């Protein structure tokens, strides 16, 4: 992606006042009109590289002032394509893209009121840190003293101290380079900040610290953010809303909690967090409760979910979805655990900080994963155990015909 032209905002505005007044002018200019969406994607489509494929198929969304919306999905889902379309690096085959009510058709990236950061900070190597952060202001005619003052202030807000201002970007760690890129993308107060999975290359404390700063600063700066991500945990922490993409298509939109607790189908369930997807056939449906014979031979119950394929019907193939944290495990025979318990065998146990991850064999060739708090009595690998779950924790989805 040729990103070095992005971050200018709308060209042509000249600031001759002090830094504080200039920042206020930027904020006023970037704000959408009351009741007007900052970003609208109206039936946007983009063909893929292979004939007959869709990189992005009929995406519609509206992003309101101050909202943080994440496009969540695996590689090839269409997330980066959507970001590039909004940025102006790609042109849609159909549909409209509007920023603050203005159509962006054929408008080049540097004419769009945006900031952009991807997983590669893409800083100018020949410029020092301060000049990188100040570049969008320089491109818009802000005098040197004004732009350096505002850039230095923005760098500090993103955790880049003044002692690093005159270093070249290559002298900084990847996390610090990313902070400089975020300062550069926000220093001019863009109407829309585009983030193409920028935290993907970080891990551990650096990732958590930058995610916390991003969450805090997007509110403090009044940013409106369109974010692309693969990691559902990160997306859930940052986002007000999410759109789950898969194969270039939007499968479901909603709040992070709503998508996690009520996925429309097994694909959305898997993309929004760990889950067990157990194939089977519906035996009966009564008052919204499905009795299912799983392919591993066990019988289980769950709540019927009406999704894209319709509602589960007796005799139809289905998938029972259960999150690992909702599977109870005990080192007891089924009759001692309770009426709905079934026999299992512990295959593997792994300690993972705040939880113990268990892999269990059930029925004939079946397998599921359970997450339990540390300190509970659990079987040893190879031992017989029992599993159970509450009816409300399991969902039954009808499979495609």
Image (tube, rainbow, N blue to C red):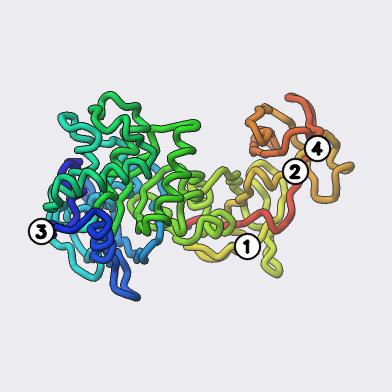
Classed neighbour count for the residue bearing mark 2: other residues with Cα under 10 Å, few (<14), some (14–19), many (≥20): some
- Quarter of the figure with the N terminus: top left
Q: Which type of secondary structure does the marked residue at label 3 adopt?
A: loop
Residue 202 sits in which quadrant? top left
Tell me whether circle 3 and circle 2 mark residues in contact (CB < 8 Å). Answer: no
The disc label shown at residue 328, or none: 2
Mark 4 lies on a secondary structure that is strand
Give the answer, above or below, for where 391 lies relative to 353: below
Q: Is 343 left or right of 192, judged from the image as shown?
A: right
> Mark 4 Cα within 10 Å, few/some/many (few <14, many 20+)?
many
Which residue is painted at 30% across and 65% down in the image? Answer: 38
> Is 241 drawn above or below residue 280 in the view shown?
below
Q: Which callout, 1 or 3, points at the residue further toward the start of the chain?
A: 3
Query: Residue 57 appears in which quarter of the rendering?
Result: bottom left
Front position among marks 1 and 2: 2
Which residue: 51% across, 44% down? Answer: 233
Question: Real-space Cα distance between discs 2 and 4?
Answer: 7 Å
Mark 3 or 2: the one toward you: 3
- As measured in the structure, the alpha-carbon distance from the residue carrying label 1 to the one carrying label 3 is 57 Å
Mark 1 touching mark 4, by CB under 8 A? no
Say whether residue 21 is visible: yes
Furthest residue in direction bottom, as rendered: 35
Left or right of residue 204: residue 396: right
- Near mark 3 (Cα within 10 A), the count class, few <14, some 14-19 or many ≥20, is few
Q: Are marks 2 and 4 in contact (CB under 8 Å)?
A: yes
In this view of the protein, which residue sits in the foreground, 318 or 226?
226
Question: Mark 4 — residue?
Answer: 330
Q: Position of residue 252 (x, y in %)?
A: 45, 59
Image position, residue 109 (x, y; %): 16, 52
In primary-sequence order, the first of circles 4 and 3 is: 3
Q: Which residue is mark 1?
A: 304
Q: Secondary structure at mark 2?
A: strand
């Amino acid at each position: 992606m040729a990103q070095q032209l992005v971050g200018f905002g709308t060209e042509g505005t000249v600031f001759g006042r002090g830094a504080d007044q200039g920042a206020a002018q930027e904020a006023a200019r970037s704000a959408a009109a009351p009741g007007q969406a900052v970003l609208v994607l109206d039936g946007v489509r983009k063909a893929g590289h292979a004939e007959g494929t869709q990189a992005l198929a009929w995406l519609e969304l509206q992003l309101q002032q101050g909202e943080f919306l994440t496009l969540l999905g695996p590689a090839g889902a269409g997330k980066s394509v959507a970001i590039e379309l909004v940025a102006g690096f790609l042109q849609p085959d159909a549909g409209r893209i509007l920023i603050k009510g203005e159509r962006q058709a054929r408008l080049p990236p540097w004419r769009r009121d945006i900031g952009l950061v991807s997983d590669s900070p893409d800083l100018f190597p020949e410029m020092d840190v301060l000049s990188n952060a100040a570049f969008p202001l320089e491109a818009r005619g802000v005098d040197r003293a004004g732009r350096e003052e505002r850039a230095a202030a923005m760098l500090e807000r993103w955790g880049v101290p003044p002692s690093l201002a005159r270093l070249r970007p290559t002298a900084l760690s990847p996390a610090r380079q990313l902070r400089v890129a975020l300062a550069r993308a926000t220093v001019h107060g863009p109407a829309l900040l585009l983030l193409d999975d920028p935290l993907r290359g970080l891990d551990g404390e650096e990732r958590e610290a930058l995610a916390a700063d991003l969450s805090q600063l997007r509110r403090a700066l009044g940013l409106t953010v369109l974010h692309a991500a693969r990691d559902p945990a990160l997306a859930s922490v940052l986002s007000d809303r999410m759109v789950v993409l898969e194969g270039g298509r939007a499968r479901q939109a909603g709040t992070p909690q709503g998508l996690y607790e009520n996925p429309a189908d097994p694909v959305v369930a898997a993309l929004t967090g760990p889950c067990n997807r157990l194939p089977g056939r519906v035996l009966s449906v009564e008052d919204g409760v499905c009795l299912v014979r799983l392919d591993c031979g066990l019988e289980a119950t769950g709540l019927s979910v009406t999704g894209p394929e319709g509602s589960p019907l007796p005799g139809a193939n289905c998938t029972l979805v259960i999150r690992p944290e909702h599977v109870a495990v005990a080192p007891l025979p089924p009759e001692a655990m309770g009426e709905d318990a079934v026999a299992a065998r512990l295959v593997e146990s792994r300690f993972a900080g705040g939880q113990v991850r268990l892999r269990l064999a059930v029925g004939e060739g079946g397998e599921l994963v359970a997450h339990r708090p540390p300190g509970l009595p659990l079987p040893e690998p190879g031992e017989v155990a029992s599993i159970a779950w509450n009816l409300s924790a399991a969902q039954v989805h009808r499979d495609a015909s």
